[in-house]
Amino acid sequence: MKKKHWKSQFTSSLFVLPYLFLFVVFLLVPILYGIWISFHNWDLLAANHKFVGLQNYVDIFTSSTNIHKKFFQGMWSTIQFVIYSVPLLVILGLLFALLVNALPKRIQGLFRTIYFLPYAISVSVVAVIWLWILDTNSGLLNLLLHKPIPWLTELPYAWVALVLATIWWTIGFNMIIFINALNDVPEDMYEAASLDGANSWQKLIHITLPAIKPILIFVVITSTIASFNVYGQPFLMTRGGPGVATKVLLMNIVDTAFQDRQLGSASAMAILMSLIMIIISIIQFKATNLKKE
């Protein structure tokens, strides 16, 4: 009996091994190697890389250094994008899910496809589409508005353009997750609420939101992480402008690594960014689970 149980465990482990191999090779090893590089003065063109300990991290927090300006300017731009985009991605994702769920069954699949379709295209195609729509002189939106609004070259329009493109691109993913969560809410709870005279708003607040709370937390955290990792939209649409107003932290990390050739400083910036994302995700998880505890 024990031999049979051991064989069963061994067979199950074989299914995990490919994922474990990919996780170690493509995630764990690069992370550990990046941490190791962050402890060195790692010039890409130099033959030797001097070990400097925590100096790269100290430089980030020293106000007179160039790396300090790059890190905190990029972090401020990134945080602004997170603040502008995450609430809309969560609220609109849930709103679209409720609207699609309320449609007749025979056309739900059509609208799910329409909303999810942009998520299947690459960020470069998204940028080309929105550059065409938002161009100041010949853009479709300005032609419709009959106003030369500088969507990509002035504030606050540049942020509006980036958030708008991001919502159009990724809202379908959150919507599909919310639809799956809504389908798991027992129908008899709504029927009982209807018998008690509850209206649609009361059903949403007292039944739907508590029932999908774990999924809601998941969407908030994943949307925050995705927004912190924004790179393609500002790089392709505004080039970080006007000035450096929309130059997010990932753009500064890439510049530090490949323009300044300082891979050690860039790795330290990336590690600090990851730690900040982990701390914010933990705070979000704790805050949204406060009532349950």
Image (cartoon, rainbow, N blue to C red):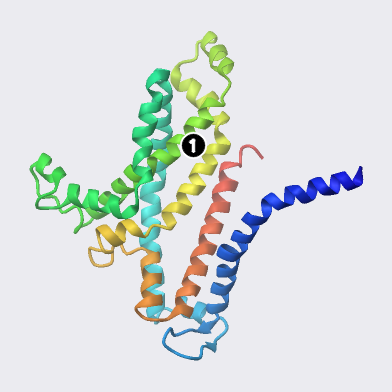
Horizontal side of residue 17 vs 102, given as left or right: right
Disc 1 crowd, CA 10 A, few/some/many (<14, 14-19, 20+): some
Kind of residue at badge 1:
Ile
Residue underneath mark 1: 177
Picture quadrant of residue 21: bottom right
Q: Secondary structure at mark 1?
A: helix
In terms of depth relative to the viewer, which is nearer, 87 or 33? 33
Total marks placed = 1
Horizontal side of residue 267 vs 9, given as left or right: left
Q: Quadrant of the C terminus?
A: top right
> Which x, y percent locates residue 134?
18, 49
Furthest-right residue in view?
1
Residue at 43% x, 24% y is 101
Q: Quadrant of the N terminus?
A: top right
Position of residue 213 relative to residue 124, above or below, is above
> Which x, y percent locates residue 282?
58, 53
Residue at 53% x, 83% y is 40
Residue at 58% x, 47% y is 285
Residue at 27% x, 53% y is 127
In terms of depth relative to the viewer, which is nearer, 70 or 256? 256
In terms of depth relative to the viewer, which is nearer, 17 or 161? 17
Furthest-top residue in view?
195
Horizontal side of residue 177 vs 104, given as left or right: right
> Which x, y percent locates residue 216?
52, 38
> Which x, y percent locates residue 258?
37, 76
